[in-house]
Image (spheres, helix red, strand yellow):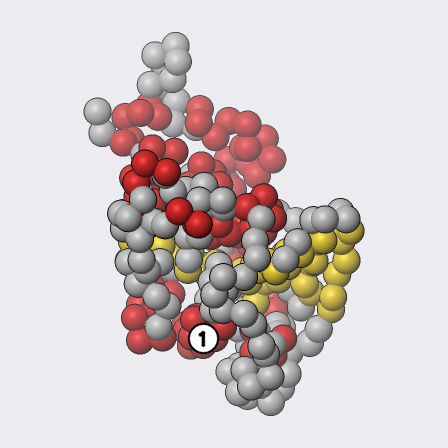
Amino acid sequence: MGGREVDKAGPDGTVDPHERYRRQIKLIGEKGQEKLKNSTVFIAGIGGLGGTAAIYLAAAGIGKLIIAHEGTVSLPDLNRQILMDSRRIGEERVALAVENLRRINPNVIIEAHPERIRYERAKAWVESSDIVVDARYDFLERYALNKACIDWNKPMVEAAMYGFEVSITTIWPGKTACLNCIYPEQSYSWEPYGFPVLGATSGIAGAYAAIEVIKVITGIGKPYFNQMHRFDTLHFHSYTVSFKRNERCSHCGEQEGESYESVYERFARR
Ligand SMILES: [Zn+2]
């Protein structure tokens, strides 16, 4: 049985392509569901954060996911990478992700790249996406992605976690603060490997990212533009940090024109 046929026959044998999404259509409407189906999301990194975002975006019926992550599944990944599998240690991470995402929703088209994020490679994936999720921890990859999103004028959901704290903001190139406006390239320090992480915390950040993507695509709610939502998962304390675009930013500076509000409004109405 092909992927699409799975959804055509409901439990009672009737044909209803919307049966899978019936409960969320009550929130985002038929039109919102159609927008999800017609969208391509590039998820950079499918670890604890990006893997959780991929699960929820696949389940929600995004038309196409592009995923990229280098390497193989290792035992210390499994406290958080719920898209992986204890029985498949040593296997290529993205191949396993494709298999499991297809099991979650066989209707989603998935393009997978077993690679790190480098500008020259990532720009094609960014170009063919409607929106990007930055789920990498390595700032070199995050800056490369930020530049590619600026060059192709694609919105980017920037989700991160550190310790018990998660953070989320959405970047609209040239209109809102970009990653480099928030964390200038020369000044930011980050422990690149082996940082402490509890799976549930990275999962919350991934779920936040999935919701933010759905908000931007469907036009429901208000994305976190020029604001960063931070949630301390240890004390259940949340707060919002506001910022502005740096006109002299080395990544996104010297761009003029419409405000992000009017650009986003047009995107959401399409
Ligand atoms: Zn910037």
Residue for badge 1: 140
**Quadrant occupied by the N terminus:** top left
Q: Is residue 57 above or below residue 140?
A: above
**Residue at the farthest left position:** 1
Q: Is residue 141 above or below residue 214?
A: below
> Percent x, y for residue 193?
47, 65
Classify residue 61 as left or right of residue 223: left
Q: Observer-nearest residue: 218 or 248?
A: 248
Which residue is at 44% across, 44% downward?
78
> Percent x, y for residue 152?
41, 72
**Residue at the farthest top position:** 12
Q: Secondary structure at mark 1?
A: helix
Q: Is residue 256 visible?
A: no
Within 8 Å of ligand 1, the CB of disc 1? no
Amino acid at circle 1:
Leu
- Residue 18, located in which quarter of the rendered image? top left
Q: Is residue 225 above or below residue 200?
A: below
Answer few, some or many: residues within 10 Å of disc 1's Cα (few below 14, many 20 plus, some between 14 and 19).
some
Which residue is at 56% across, 53% downward?
197
> Percent x, y for residue 21?
48, 30
Numbered circles on residues, count: 1
- Residue 55, located in which quarter of the rendered image? top left
Q: Observer-nearest residue: 205 or 20?
A: 205
> Percent x, y for residue 147?
45, 76
Which residue is at 74% across, 66% downward?
241
Classify residue 71 as left or right of residue 190: left
- Residue 28, located in which quarter of the rendered image? top right
Q: Is residue 86 above or below residue 228?
A: above
